[in-house]
Amino acid sequence: MKSSLLFPLCTAAGAFALAAMLPLGDPDMYWHLASGQWMLDHREILRFDIFSSTVSGQPYSVGEWLGEVVFALVFNVGGWAGLTLFRALLAAVAAFALARLSRRRDAPIIAALLVVVWAVAFSKPWWIDRPAMFTFVLFPVVLDLLYRARAGSRWALLAIPPLILLWTNLHAGYVLGLALVLAFAVEAAVRRQSAFVPLALTLVASVGLSFVDPETFGVAGAAAHALASPRFIIEEAPPDVLEPTGALFAGFVLATLGLALFRGGGLLDALLLIPLLWLALSAQRHLAFFVVAATPYIAAEGARLYVRLRPHGVPMRPLPGVLSVGIAVAFAALALASALGRPGAPDEHAYPAGAIAALRTGTGTLLNEYDWGGYLIYRVPERKVFIDGRLFPFYPAVLLEYRDAVELRPDWKSVLSKYDVREALLMPAKPLAVALRESGWTVRAEGSNFVLLAKP
């Protein structure tokens, strides 16, 4: 095996092992599965709401139709265990590309390893059971192809437009792929004129193929969501450096800025890292893209800085060949063991499982917790939800009204009246749950993390 492949394969095996041991249970996984299954059953794209009582029948698009179908197909073939392994496989592909990126500028293996371990540890929250995982995977893959094309590989350049076409239909994050191609094309126009025409043609082809999307979410829709996100949803809020993920991200930013001050950087570095840093600071769900793009820069420039400042007698040497092979075998065994010991069912302790029976016998409009909407769509399809993680059909009107109601803002009673809410499934400590109890609403079901209240 080529030594250039050993490190990426070990990284991929390690990421696979970690991802395979994580239980399923993402809040949005359930409604993505329900949407994908509906499309498989009806042989058409789901273009209107069928799950809610608040926007029922209204047209909408989330830009993920093919991603939802793929997840539903994987579930139909392999069940919950199949979804776990599929997510682990996607994480492995992303880690493989990330490891290749870390060596892109001839960074020593030790330096690349340190940065990649840091990046993989940071990226674990993005190993999610929904179509957004495809963007997390395809972003480093396309970036790696662009670096290979920059080094002279025409095959890498030819692979990009088909990947953009696939990405367009899997998830709306394909706009990031177009932005990567644009950054490399601009750099070529300024610094490497001979490479500009192939990159410009690749950009034109990629943009053209991005319109081959039957769901018609479009570049404008994807960009608009990035620029105008509802900040009171956690993943749409700016990063919090006091949280573990935010702290790791802050470390990447500080390392990048510090190396830029000591070592400088090229035009391509600026074209990639500055916009991605701005995007990351705008919403937590974008943090990983800056980290991925910064990985090759930190690995290479950090190693060069170390060589310049290292104490005498402490060289940065590669690992011995025998030790490298031993590590590879160990990682392969770890990946196999994790695949065999994967979780067989989702972790639903955070959901109101104890309310399912009562919900099935209830009637009228149900007001539910935002994070429980997808779970209810899947587990209790006969009851329409008030709101769920699809976001687009509810934003801004219903989402703002929901917030007004559950936070007990001045117009909360008018919201309940407008939608004729008959039942409420909420966390017990929510202000609305407390107020409804005090108003005489009866408890139909209750648990440590939920209460189902019915209007008298």
Image (cartoon, rainbow, N blue to C red):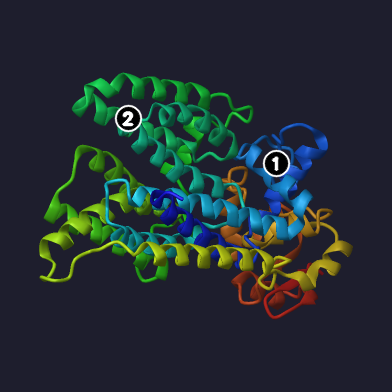
Q: Image check: 275 left or right of 72?
A: left
> Is any part of residue 129 visible from this angle?
no
**Which residue was labeled with disc 2?**
152
The spot of residue 6 in percent (x, y) is 44, 54
The spot of residue 103 in percent (x, y) is 33, 50
Residue with the most extreme front position: 322
**Could you classify mark 2 by the number of other residues whose Cα lies within 10 Å: few (under 14), some (14-19), or many (20 or more)?**
few
Q: Image check: 27 left or right of 454?
A: left
Say if 226 sits above or below 208 in the image. below
Residue drawn at the location 68% of the way across and 73% of the way down: 349
Residue drawn at the location 37% of the way across and 32% of the way down: 181
Q: Which quadrant of the view contains residue 69?
A: top right
- Element on which disc 1 rests: helix
The spot of residue 446 in percent (x, y) is 76, 77
The disc placed on residue 350 is none
The spot of residue 253 in percent (x, y) is 28, 58
Residue with the most extreme bottom position: 448
Of residue 193 and residue 125, the one placed in the foreground of this image is 193
Say if 230 sits above or below 172 in the image. below
Residue type highlighted by circle 2: Gly
Residue type highlighted by circle 1: Val
**Which residue was labeled with disc 1?**
69
Earlier in the chain: of badge 1 and badge 2, it is 1
Residue drawn at the location 67% of the way across and 76% of the way down: 449
Of residue 193 and residue 44, the one placed in the foreground of this image is 193
**Could you classify mark 1 by the number of other residues whose Cα lies within 10 Å: few (under 14), some (14-19), or many (20 or more)?**
many
